[in-house]
Amino acid sequence: TKVQSLKNHQESPDIILSELPKERGWLSDQHVHQYNGFWYPTGILQGLIALQQHHYKPQPNDVLLASYPKSGTTWLKALLFAITNRTQYNFNTHPLLSSNPHELVPQLEAYAFKHPTNPTPNTSLMHSHLAFNSLPESKCKIVYVFRDPKDVLASCWHFVQKLRSKELPSISLPEAFDQFTKGCSPFGPFWDHVMGYYKASLEFPKTVLFLKYEDLKKNPIFNAKRLAEFLGQPFSLEEESEGIVDRITELCSFEKLSNLEVNKDGTHTGFFIPTIANNTFFRQGKVGDSKNHLSGEMIEVLDEITKQKLGSDLITT
Ligand code: A3P
């Protein structure tokens, strides 16, 4: 297609963007553009183009966290950071006590947007909201976090209420629902995003791990061990008996992180937004809160799409 053929050329991002279908974005006056089947905000696409033009490839030892927005990225960033760096830090002076997880684990395509001439972040742990089919090919380990789309939509909508510029017309929940179910929400269609990673996890179980937010909530310790094993860094018996797994899951829990000074009152520099309040990333941290916000009809529609598109394997309720 035109899009795929453009991708391999050194065209300017503006020319590439102008060729793509677009829709209203959610956070700012940036649009979302349809590229390779997904709706990406302008800056994200510019970052992706920079990565492609530099033929960027993660290293085999890198770890990439992938997620649809509001699916538990902040939590997984914290967990992966704490697990992969566990020999370097103690729990009294741990970086997670003084930095928001988003400062410790950069978002690949957002970093590339900010540094288009040298788009490679210098960390081996990073994150992406890109769909699986837009990721650079690589042998690195990928951890995907899935969350019930009802909670994702409710969480997204609250996030947008907080961050969307007050100068722009607000987006009502029914409007957000409409765009989300049609598939043209940022990084959507949600269900295709999930399916891309789910299929990859079945096809390449050694390199792609598919986790559910709801499972993590139910059993964080079991899932932290699973993560460490998947990354080739299993907890030793000694570590387990010292309580390291418990301490990591406690440190990364919603209760702990959201009550830290840095996450209550601190801010960090965003790639797209100059200053973001860290508390924007912590709201309820619960399973099923969407039922307090979505109408019965919205819930039915979302469950029906999920059943049709993802099948019973991924139904979480
Ligand atoms: P809610 O809005 O439902 O509370 P992301 O990190 O992908 O942006 O997702 C944000 C969602 O994850 C928010 O959901 C937020 O409260 C929740 N969250 C943040 N940190 C968490 C943690 N440590 N444990 C569980 N949920 C967390």
Image (tube, rainbow, N blue to C red):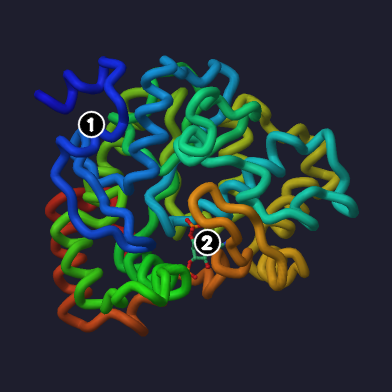
**Left or right: where does residue 251 sit relative to residue 292?**
right
Residue 289 image position (x, y, % from top left): 41, 77
> Which residue is at 58% across, 24% downward?
62
> Which residue is at 67% across, 28% downward?
233
SS label for mark 2:
helix
> Which residue is at 49% across, 71% downward?
286
Disc on res. 263? none
> Which residue is at 65% across, 51% downward?
101
Residue 89 image position (x, y, % from top left): 85, 41
Callout 2: 10 Å neighbours few (<14), some, many (20+)? Answer: few
Q: Quadrant of residue 90?
A: top right
Amino acid tagged 2: Lys
**In this view of the protein, which residue sits in the foreground, 312 or 260?**
260
From what the image shows, is residue 210 above or below residue 283?
above
**Left or right: where does residue 117 sit relative to residue 310?**
right
State the separation of the CA atoms marked 2 and 1.
47 Å
Whether residue 138 can be seen here = yes
**In this view of the protein, which residue sits in the foreground, 113 or 221?**
113
Q: How many numbered discs, if any?
A: 2
Whether residue 288 can be seen here = no
Question: Outermost residue toward the left?
Answer: 1
Amino acid tagged 1: Ile
From what the image shows, is residue 268 above or below residue 256?
above
Residue beneath disc 1: 15
Residue beneath disc 2: 218
Label 2 or label 1, whichever comes before in sequence order:
1
Q: Quadrant of the C terminus?
A: bottom left
